[in-house]
Amino acid sequence: MLLLNRSDIEKCYSLKDCIAAVADAFKYFSAGKVDVPLRTQILKQNGKDTFLCMPVFVKSMMRHV
Protein backbone atom coordinates (compact mmCIF):
# COMPACT_ATOMS: atom_id res chain seq x y z
CA MET A 1 0.00 0.00 0.00
CA LEU A 2 1.29 3.45 -0.89
CA LEU A 3 0.73 6.03 1.81
CA LEU A 4 0.83 9.67 0.73
CA ASN A 5 1.28 12.65 2.98
CA ARG A 6 -0.27 16.06 2.45
CA SER A 7 2.72 17.40 0.53
CA ASP A 8 2.68 14.42 -1.87
CA ILE A 9 -1.00 14.95 -2.63
CA GLU A 10 -0.73 18.72 -3.06
CA LYS A 11 1.93 18.19 -5.76
CA CYS A 12 -0.57 16.50 -8.07
CA TYR A 13 -4.07 17.34 -6.80
CA SER A 14 -5.34 20.83 -6.02
CA LEU A 15 -8.30 21.97 -3.96
CA LYS A 16 -9.89 23.11 -7.23
CA ASP A 17 -9.48 19.56 -8.61
CA CYS A 18 -11.04 18.15 -5.45
CA ILE A 19 -14.07 20.45 -5.57
CA ALA A 20 -14.67 19.54 -9.23
CA ALA A 21 -14.41 15.80 -8.43
CA VAL A 22 -16.88 16.07 -5.54
CA ALA A 23 -19.32 18.01 -7.73
CA ASP A 24 -19.09 15.30 -10.40
CA ALA A 25 -19.59 12.59 -7.78
CA PHE A 26 -22.82 14.20 -6.57
CA LYS A 27 -24.08 14.52 -10.16
CA TYR A 28 -23.43 10.85 -10.93
CA PHE A 29 -24.94 9.74 -7.61
CA SER A 30 -28.06 11.91 -8.05
CA ALA A 31 -28.55 10.50 -11.55
CA GLY A 32 -28.40 6.94 -10.19
CA LYS A 33 -25.31 6.12 -12.27
CA VAL A 34 -23.16 4.66 -9.48
CA ASP A 35 -22.88 1.42 -7.55
CA VAL A 36 -22.00 2.14 -3.93
CA PRO A 37 -21.35 -0.91 -1.74
CA LEU A 38 -21.44 -0.64 2.03
CA ARG A 39 -18.52 1.12 3.66
CA THR A 40 -15.89 -1.12 5.20
CA GLN A 41 -14.61 -0.07 8.63
CA ILE A 42 -11.43 -1.42 10.20
CA LEU A 43 -10.80 -0.46 13.81
CA LYS A 44 -7.25 -0.41 15.12
CA GLN A 45 -6.50 -2.40 18.24
CA ASN A 46 -6.27 0.80 20.30
CA GLY A 47 -10.03 1.20 19.78
CA LYS A 48 -9.64 4.83 18.74
CA ASP A 49 -8.40 4.91 15.16
CA THR A 50 -10.44 3.78 12.17
CA PHE A 51 -9.65 3.06 8.53
CA LEU A 52 -12.65 3.59 6.24
CA CYS A 53 -12.86 2.21 2.72
CA MET A 54 -15.70 3.72 0.74
CA PRO A 55 -15.55 2.33 -2.81
CA VAL A 56 -17.77 3.30 -5.71
CA PHE A 57 -18.08 2.16 -9.32
CA VAL A 58 -19.18 4.38 -12.20
CA LYS A 59 -19.44 2.32 -15.37
CA SER A 60 -19.62 5.35 -17.65
CA MET A 61 -16.21 6.49 -16.40
CA MET A 62 -14.45 3.28 -17.41
CA ARG A 63 -11.76 3.86 -20.00
CA HIS A 64 -11.13 1.17 -22.55
CA VAL A 65 -7.47 0.76 -23.33
Image: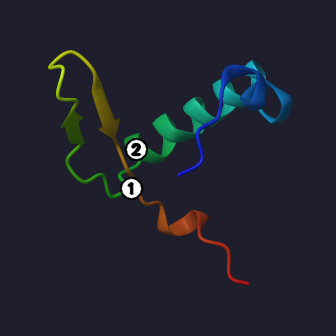
What residue sits 34% from the left and 43% below the top? Answer: 53
Residue 29 marker: 2
Residue 47 coordinates in the image, percent (x, y):
14, 20
User: Contact, CB < 8 Å: mark 2 with mark 1?
Assistant: yes
* Residue 60 in which image quadrant: bottom right
Residue 35 coordinates in the image, percent (x, y):
33, 58
| Residue 1, above or below 10 | below
Residue 4 coordinates in the image, percent (x, y):
64, 34
N-terminal of the two: label 2 or label 1? 2
Crowd band around label 1 with a 10 angstrom C-alpha radius: few (<14), some (14–19), many (20+): some
Q: Say which residue label 1 marks.
A: 34
Is 25 on the left-hand or right-hand side of 33? right
Which amino acid type is shown beneath numbered disc 2? Answer: Phe
Q: Nearer the viewer, residue 8 or 37?
A: 8
What residue sits 52% from the left and 52% below the top? Answer: 1
| Residue 23, above or below 28 | above
Is 64 on the left-hand or right-hand side of 45? right
Residue that protrudes farthest toward the bottom in the picture = 65
Quarter of the rendering occupied by the C terminus: bottom right
Report how far apart the C-alphas of labels 2 and 1 lie in the structure: 6 Å
Q: Secondary structure at mark 1?
A: loop
Q: Secondary structure at mark 2?
A: helix
What residue sits 68% from the left and 21% below the top? Answer: 6
